[in-house]
Every structure is written in C-alpha cells, then in structure tokens.
Image: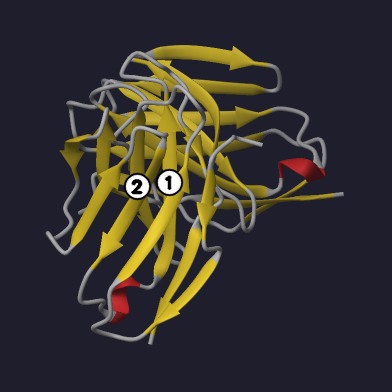
Amino acid sequence: ETGVTQSPTHLIKTRGQQVTLRCSSQSGHNTVSWYQQALGQGPQFIFQYYREEENGRGNFPPRFSGLQFPNYSSELNVNALELDDSALYLCASKGGPEDDTQYFGPGTRLTVL
Amino acid sequence: QKEVEQDPGPLSVPEGAIVSLNCTYSNSAFQYFMWYRQYSRKGPELLMYTYSSGNKEDGRFTAQVDKSSKYISLFIRDSQPSDSATYLCAMSPWGNEKLTFGTGTRLTIIP
C-alpha cells in the first residue's frame, strides 16, 4: 500500500455540474500532485501543490482548481463538467522536491453523462 | 506530435522471456526518466528512476537512457505472469514530479 487514499472510488455526474475529489497523503508528504488519466492513455499532469501553494500547472483550464490542507489532505475541484472530463483522477504525494519517490493513490473514476 | 511516444501494444510474451519496452521523446529539457507499472484498477507504482543517460539495474529490471537519441528502454528478464500490467514511461526536467507520461504499453506474460 502507498499510504495515499482517494475518495470516492467512483462518481457519476452530468454535464455542467461541479465535482470535488479528495485525497489523503502520508504524514510528512508536503507535495501533492493531481493527474487525469483517460481510458487507454497515460496520466496527464494537472497541477502540483507544495506546502499549500500551487507550484506547477499542466495544460488544463482554470475550471480545474485545487486545495491542499495542513493535515496532508487535498482536493481537486472541477467546475462546469464536460463529457471529456470522464477519466480516472490520480493523486500522488511525495515528501518534498528532493524526494525521489512519488506515491500514487488508486484514483477516482469520474463519469460525466 | 506528443512529447512522449510509447507503443501501446498489447504485447504478449511467454513466461521466462526477456521483455523490451521503450519510449521516445522530443523535449530536450527532460533530465529525469522513470518507469511505472500500473495494475488494473490501481494507481501507478514506481519501478525505476534514472537521471540523465546511462543504465540502471534493479533485480530483473534494467532501465537504459540514451539522451542523444531521445530514447529510453526498460528490460525485464525472466518475465513472470505477475509482471502482466501496463508499463508507463514518464519523464520530467525537475525530478520525480510534474511528470509527462507515455501512453503505456499493456504487457501480458503467458504461463
């Protein structure tokens, strides 16, 4: 086990709705990243937080936003859901910029109808 | 054109065979190269992590990086049915973070 948990496991939403996905990292892991993995594709980097500040963002629109909390939990929020947002959303955590190992959670499967 | 290209397979080999997986990339800024393994309904797990060009061996796994050709490889010796999974290459200019992944190669080891 990686020590990274995500909730919920599965989620079904309709187009235009908003969704919040949650992640809980290992104690001491100050860096958390979120990735989107479409079916049959590799994960795509959405953004990264370090000590509650965003410190990197991939090619995703502003309707994808995040929060990181002092208790090593974090959230991914997606507004105005589109059909193409249907994917597995992965959370990954690591201790800090010098830490070589990044631990992934099992993901949340989001389906947008 | 994608920054990282990886043959999606599927690839099926008999147990005990040597497996060769590879990726090509176009971004010269990539300095850190990783291979992840992803089982069905699981998140990716790190297999190998290398910096710049060269070889790295860990048990039955060997990772090779050729920056001059922008080509990385993963070799699996004495393949086992438990190696059946999707193998993802990933790379970054900064370390094991903010990764750019390949599509993944789906590998099946036949007993």
B88 or A60: nearer the viewer = A60
Vertical placement of A68 versus B91: above or below? below
CA gap, disc 1 and disc 2: 5 Å
Quadrant the N terminus of chain B occupies: bottom left
A31 or B92: nearer the viewer = A31
SS at badge 2: strand
> What chain does badge 2 belong to?
A
Residues at marks 1 and 2 touching, judged by CB atoms closer than 8 Å:
yes
Farthest left residue?
Answer: A62
Vertical placement of A68 versus B57: above or below? below
Q: Hey, what amino acid is under mark 2? A: Trp
Residue depicted at 56% across the width and 51% down the height: A106
Of labels 1 and 2, earlier in sequence is 2
SS at badge 1: strand
Q: Residues within 10 Å of mark 2 (few under 14, many from 20)?
A: many
Coordinates of residue B63 in the picture (x, y in percent): 52, 22
Report the side of A55 relative to A25 (left or right): left
> What chain does badge 1 belong to?
A
Numbered mark located on residue A91 in the image: 1
Residue pointed to by mark 2: A34
Q: Residue B27: name its quadrant.
A: top left
Residue depicted at 80% across the width and 45% down the height: B81
Q: Hey, what amino acid is under mark 1? A: Cys
Farthest front residue?
Answer: A71
B19 or A104: nearer the viewer = A104
